[in-house]
Image (cartoon, rainbow, N blue to C red):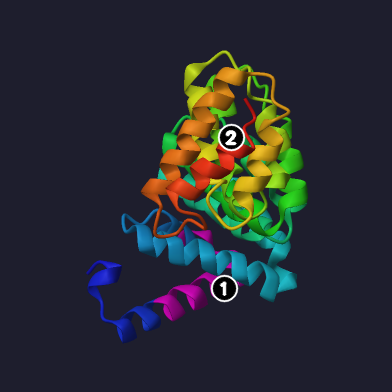
Amino acid sequence: MEFYQLNKEERIQKVTAITEEIQTSFSNSNMINILTFLSDSDTYIRKTAYIAIGRLYFRQPSLRNNIIVALQLFMNEPDFKIRQTTVNAAGEIGIRDFETVVHFFDTGLFDAHHSVRNAVIGSVKKMGEKNPKPVLQWAYKYLHHSNKEIRREICHGIELRGRTHPQDILPLLKELQFDKTARVRNTLVHVLGQIAYKKGCLETAIADLKNWENKEVVKKAIEEIIDVHHRYRNFAALSQEEAKVFIQFNSPL
């Protein structure tokens, strides 16, 4: 039976059982049971597993070395679901201890399977939100990578931090304003829209855009920001009309 076909009490029991099984397996260096959870076809079982691994890492310091060594081995497994869940587990750890797991993202970013690469970006989002300094420093070194998809994924990955602290990621976004790949520039414009609709964020974004040299990108960003204020009107700090008026009186063009 799939995880969400269980009732609430059964789900709680399932999570507890998986968590206890994973702890026992790491304690006994029995990786087979852990791999069973990491490769499960049910997304929610895999999520339960990687969250359990992250919590165990901080709750049981004596198991940290076992966990890291095991995760390193898991990154070589042929099943992409195992590698994907491993990266997500590293992401849980990286929220507080990024330096220990940074190499998982250096590897996962170039994985052959898109699900693993997406797990890197998802992890960058959650880590960057809670532990921004080392994560953004890591992201910076990939902003001008020769692979356009790496540049695009990094741009997308730093978005979540920007929704609450746009000033932290705007310097990184600015680095991409003259990127030669339309797909990267389009992601850049999308992210600029996403970091400009919360309270106080529009002002920060528009002030920064005044210092950008690529006015074509700035123009598209303004159009996206205005459109986002309509699409996300139930969540935006300002109405679309208020955003238009603000941009008109503080135009970066």
The residue that label 2 is drawn on is 155
Front residue of 20/11: it is 11
Near mark 1 (Cα within 10 A), the count class, few <14, some 14-19 or many ≥20, is many
Residue in view at x 33 percent, y 86 percent: 9
> Which residue is at 68% across, 29% downward?
174
* Left or right: 21 in relation to 14: right
| Residue found at the far top of this picture | 180
User: Quick check: can you spot residue 17?
Assistant: yes
Examine the structure image and report whether residue 108 is included in the region drawn in magenta. Answer: no
Q: In which quarter of the image is the C terminus?
A: top right
Find numbered disc 2 in the image and state the secondary structure of the residue it sits on: helix
Pointer 2 or 1: first along the chain: 1
The image position of residue 48, as x and y in percent, is 45, 67
x and y percentages locating residue 217 in the rendered image: 56, 23
Q: Can see residue 79?
A: no
| Residue placed most toward the observer, 115 or 137 | 137
Residue drawn at point x = 50 percent, y = 55 percent: 238
Q: Residue at x 61, y 43 (%)?
A: 158
Q: Which residue lies furthest to the bottom in this view?
A: 9
Secondary structure under tag 1 reads: helix
Q: Of the residues shown, which amino acid type is indicated by label 2?
A: Cys
Numbered tag placed on residue 23 in the rendering: 1
Q: Is 126 situated left or right of 3 in this image?
A: right
93 is higher (above) or lower (below) than 104 = below
Quadrant in which the N terminus appears: bottom left
Q: Is 62 in front, or is 158?
A: 158
- Magenta residues, start to end: 15-32
Question: Which amino acid type corresponds to the residue marked 1 in the rendered image?
Answer: Gln
Q: Is the magenta stretch mostly helix, strand or loop?
A: helix
User: How far apart in space, not on screen, are marks 2 and 1 (Cα)?
Assistant: 36 Å
